[in-house]
Image (cartoon, coloured by chain):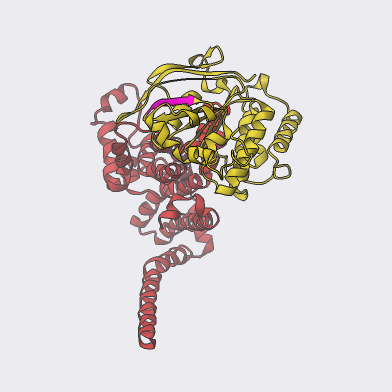
Amino acid sequence: MSSVASETKFVRGLLIGVALIFLALFVVAPLGVVFVEALRKGVGFFVETLREPDAQAAVQLTVLVAAIAVPVNIVIGLAAAWAIAKFEFKGKAALITLLDLPFSVSPVVSGLIYVLLFGAQGWFGTWLKDYNVQIIFAVPGIVLATIFVTFPFVARELIPLMQAQGSVEEEAALMLGASGWRTFFTVTLPNVKWGLLYGVLLCNARAMGEFGAVSVVSGHIRGMTDTIPLHVEILYNEYNYAGAFAMASLLAGLALVTLILKTFLEWRHGDQLAAAKRH
Amino acid sequence: MTVSVRVDNIEKDYATHPALRGVSLEVAPGELVALLGPSGSGKTTLLRVIAGLERQTAGDVFYGDIHADALSLRDRRVGFVFQNYALFRHMTVFENIAFGLRARPRRTRPGDADIRARVSSLLDLVQLSGLEARYPDQLSGGQRQRVALARALAIEPRVLLLDEPFGALDAKVRRELRAWLRELHDTTGHTTLFVTHDQDEAFDLADRVAILNSGRIEQIGAPNDVLASPATPFVAEFIRGIAWRARGPFSEAATGGAFI
């Protein structure tokens, strides 16, 4: 009936409108503001801010942390996903639950865990001091906190994918005389490569953008233990808004690139993405 | 290099139930034997134990004179064809068939030209020449099955194990492949064990049929002997359909077709 149809159309339009306005206000506008504010004092100032030694150090540290945390999480994520998807063992359910811990706990708490463990007053504090190892307020602490916070991305993406695929292709490879390593690199890994890339993408975005956990363990030493998000905060607290937004625009740019790559993966290889199937 | 297969008193317990309770079986070199039984009778478990994909709780497996435990999974050289083919989905037909050759240790690995020649002759054997560049999802079920078989044959297996080889195919293709497999077996002469729940398939194809029920072999023998004298009430009941057709006026046997 026409009245029903028009009413549906009206409701549909209303809902779409509300969603679009919400998106525009809360997502697109802030993102735009970042870039507008970053360039408020001109391109010259923007470039100047990014070339400043402390800013350079922050960028380098962020890249370094991601360059360590992401590969570590690839290896651990693959191992965990492999174990959970292909084997039956006691405590599996507990392990799956634990995998989500970094997502469910506040990042600040994640940071504090490491301070309590490795800080000067922490459990291993004296021991570490005897061996002259500095973890908290130094790069190792930042790396550890980042690994913890970004751990679930790779594993969570791979587990449903590997579970769906089962282990029959691996069995076939073994029966054909392939070694365990060969089976892994020629059968298992190619079968999950797009899912893995997807997980790595999200893992990397979070690793570079993490604020809370890193903030707790970093100590905010300019030029030493400042990552990009921390440097944004420092500049902002110094009322250097244009500078803060210039740094922030790097993270916003990273987010946009991640979003584009993610969309491309979902469009092109959706059949191999567990996340895409859940949607 | 085809050899006999012997299993001695195999037992396999799962956490909840025993799957095999003392199974003994000997398959002569070049023989084609069917493991027939209803689902849950332990036939697939037995096949996987022989392959080494499952570890038995007790009992021994021999390939010829060699105890299976003396060989790692890699060295067993057992050709296994999985129920749903288990082709490597990201590899072409060629790469699938070549996989076992490429996976060999360096000193026994054939060269590229050799591998190409071997794959090409296997493609001829399974009548799939010209499809080597296809991916598994571009093949029909029957074609995938034949690729899986070629892949298993590529490693020059001691024995060939087939798990419900035609289970996922429609009836017409099943019958065609059945005849074709018998022919292939007669050409290549591999000691072959295949699992099936289809009475017709087992009796039509095999030299001998082993009928399993709840983890035990109830009877093993040539199709006609089993049909003529079922050893237990279970066997009699299980083969009733086929027994009727074998003696009935419209059976293949009566109209000139034979079981073997």
Along the viewing direction, whichever of A237 and B79 lies nearer the viewer: B79
Q: In which quadrant of the rendered view does residue A82 lie?
A: top left
Does residue B238 appear to the left or right of A183 in the view shown?
Answer: left
Q: Residue furthest bottom?
A: A3
Residue at (38%, 35%) from the top-left corner? Answer: B40
Residues shaded magenta: B215-220
Principal secondary structure, stretch drawn in magenta: strand
Left or right relative to B81: residue A132: left
**Position of residue A250 measured from the top left corner of the image (x, y, whole percent):** 47, 55
Choose top left, top right, bottom left or bottom right for residue B100: top right
Q: Picture coordinates of residue A3 (x, y %)?
A: 36, 88
Residue B152 in sight in this render: yes
Q: Colour of chain A?
A: red
Q: Magenta includes A264?
A: no
Residue A225 against residue B191 in the figure, above or below: below
Kindly indicate which chain is depicted in yellow in the rendered structure: B
Q: Please state, as top left, top right, bottom left or bottom right, where the C terminus of chain A lies in the image.
A: bottom left
Task: Tally the numbered discs.
Answer: 0
**Residue A213, quarter of the rendered image:** top left
Residue B90 can be seen, yes or no: no
Give residue B70's position: percent from left, percent from top.
51, 14
Q: Is residue B3 left or right of residue A220?
A: right
Pick the quarter of the image with the N terminus of chain A: bottom left
Q: Is residue A159 left or right of residue B175?
A: left
